[in-house]
Image (cartoon, rainbow, N blue to C red):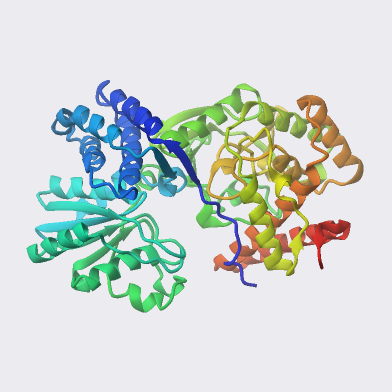
Amino acid sequence: MGGTNLLVFRDNVSHITGRKLGECLTDAVHKTARGNDREATLNALLLAGQAECATADSGSADDAARSLTDALAMSLVGQLEEARADLSDLLRKAAVGLPELVRVSRSEGFAYYALHPMDFADAAGAKSHGSSVAVIGIRSIGTVLSAMAVTALRKHGTAAERITVRPAGHPYDRSTQFTESQADWLEQEKQRGSSFLVVDEGPGLSGSSFLSVAEALVRCGINCDRIILMGTREVDPERLCTANAARRWKQFRWLKASSRIWQQYGGMTVLHGGAWRETLLAPGSEWPPCWPEMERVKFLAPDGRCVFKFDGLGDCGERARERSNAMWKSGFGPKTEYAGDGMTAYAFVPGTPLHRPYASAEMLDRIAEYCAFRASEFRTDDDSGDLLEQMAQFNFLQEFGAEANLAIESLRTASPIIADGRMQPHEWIQGSDGRVLKVDASTHGDDHFFPGPTDIAWDLAGTIVEWELSGDAETHFVEKYRERAGDDPNPRLPQFVLAYSVFRMAYCKMASAATQDRAEKARFDRAYRLYRNRIDTLCGAAAISGS
């Protein structure tokens, strides 16, 4: 059962004006002047990396944004005074040099996978790479990571310079082309006897971005033994899904950057990677499937009183924590407190995760109230309706060989929100005091999976599908939401039920293909069949056209 040719990840890209990015960057850098605030410096560094990406992608030769990123990297590793004198002038030049319209691509490691910039400073500075190192960062996240590597190398007495590149082409078959000035720089570094350090998060499923840069260096006359690839996970070359991956990968040295967050929390009980099921679910209960590599890191405190979860660095994490805080204050979620470095401390909810037979009228009222709350409180200006329609049509065609009867307008909305995206029963906990709280509710609607910003009907559909509602139960639930929200979702709800089911079917199929754990694969295969059966039922109501 193949699953790689499916759409489950969305392109998390936004466009803002250069002026707006410049204003955000200016504000962030000014906050770093209020004492030795590492959190403020970190936030400014991430924004500087975005500015550097925007400038480089526009083809500009202006290096003010790159110099600003370097200065903030120096500040983060403790060379504050050395960097401080240049910040104001670099900030002014970088803000002026931004393009009129900026394409901002979210750095997944900083947003989802507990990658801290200092991880790459630690890794680069831990070993000797010779007297001179040429660092090549893979944009977008490679801007910041390369700056951190260069700063650490210099701090340890190694001469180091850097450039950044953006590989192009299909995700499983990237190619890299150096500009003329970059080729000249590489030649100078080669003549100097430098080692070449390629930095990025990952690698992903294919490793093709890393390989494209390394092989482009080889074409420039640089020997393989002088090329080091540095990323964030252990690599099995045999499992990379690009052409001749194992043979190509083994030509180069690999260096893994270890996680500071793992070092800080590693002594606690691990809850991510599916481990939460053994810790939190009742013995003998049926485990829901879990795609371990896609879970955010989570740890249970030694005293059992809170769960530490990575919600993201920078503005992505700030928005997630704002949502968590709003849920706590409104009585829908546990108390939260920022723990630093992108981690949030959630008060542990002692109680029982719910299951499908628990769908009483009172429980459905609670979920309806929660959906009305999200529809009101978590509005956004974005809308991924077109992308949702493309996802549903593509995955439906791959699975059934026919087109789904989805009008382009059907998944658009006049009131986009950040959805919960995880309405499964086990995500609701009935506490020892009788209250039912929603957990894991602040990040999934704004991560790199579908749906992205969408209509609240996505969560209504999720409830209907995951709780297996039908007949009177579904009618009761939707009516209770309508009463509380003043919004009748019925005209658009069938389309969202279909799109939600198609996404979850594709997600389970892709996760099953990705995992090597037989028990996990079996869970995903069962879930896949449930979603597919749901779609079969909907297809009986003319959900397919031309079949």
Of all residues shown, which one is farthest toward the front? 100
- Camera-side residue: 265 or 29? 29
Residue at (83% x, 30% y) in the render:
480
Left or right, residue 343 beside residue 59? right
Tell me where residue 86 appears, x and y as whole percent.
16, 31
Tell me where residue 486 appears, x and y as whole percent.
79, 25
Left or right, residue 448 beside residue 455? left
Quadrant in which residue 472 is drawn = top right
Q: Is residue 333 above or below residue 148?
A: above
Tell me where residue 515 appears, x and y as whole percent.
56, 65
Q: Is residue 416 above or below residue 212?
A: above
Q: Is residue 438 above or below residue 182?
A: above
**Quadrant of the frame with the N terminus:** bottom right
- Could one spot residue 287 in this view of the protein? no
Residue at (64% x, 35% y) in the render:
416
Residue at (28% x, 37% y) in the render:
97
Of all residues shown, which one is farthest toward the right? 472
Left or right, residue 36 beside residue 187? right
- Count of all numbered marks drawn on residues in the image: 0
- Could one spot residue 329 in this view of the protein? yes
**Quadrant of the frame with the C terminus:** bottom right
- Camera-side residue: 37 or 19? 19
Quadrant in which residue 18 is drawn = top left
Tell me where residue 284 appears, x and y as whole percent.
70, 54
Quadrant in which residue 9 is drawn = bottom right
